[in-house]
Image: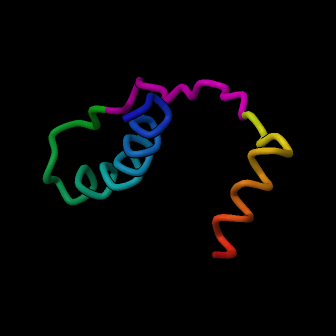
Amino acid sequence: MSHNTVMKHIQRLREIIPLGYNLEWLDKDPFRRWKTTFEKNDREFLSEIKLSNLEKQLCL
């Protein structure tokens, strides 16, 4: 998994942890001082040739 995928899963887990803490299932919040950091991704666009090849394959 990529870094950003792991951070997204941790971010969702952090939303649930306070519930367990408030219900006294956990002694403390393990994510209290921890921050999620996401890496910037530069996405490449398809070239005209690759796009036309993809369109041809999808039309078959």
What percent of the width, then of the height, locates residue 18? 34, 51
Q: Is residue 27 above or below residue 52?
A: above
Q: Residue at x 72, y 54 (%)?
A: 53
First to last magenta residue range: 31-43
Q: Residue at x 72, y 65 (%)?
A: 56
Quarter of the image holding residue 33? top left
Q: Is residue 16 above or below residue 41?
A: below
- Residue 50: say if magenta: no
What percent of the width, then of the height, locates residue 44? 74, 34
Q: Quadrant of the N terminus?
A: top left
Q: Quadrant of the C terminus?
A: bottom right
Look at the magenta stretch and give its main secondary structure.
loop
Q: Residue at x 41, y 52 (%)?
A: 15
Quarter of the image holding residue 26? top left
Is 41 left, or right, of 50 in this rendering? left
Q: Nearer the viewer, residue 43 or 34?
A: 43
Is 58 left, or right, of 30 in this rendering? right
How is the rendered protein coloured? Answer: rainbow
What percent of the width, then of the height, locates residue 9? 38, 45
What percent of the width, then of the height, locates residue 23? 21, 60
Q: Residue at x 71, y 34 (%)?
A: 43
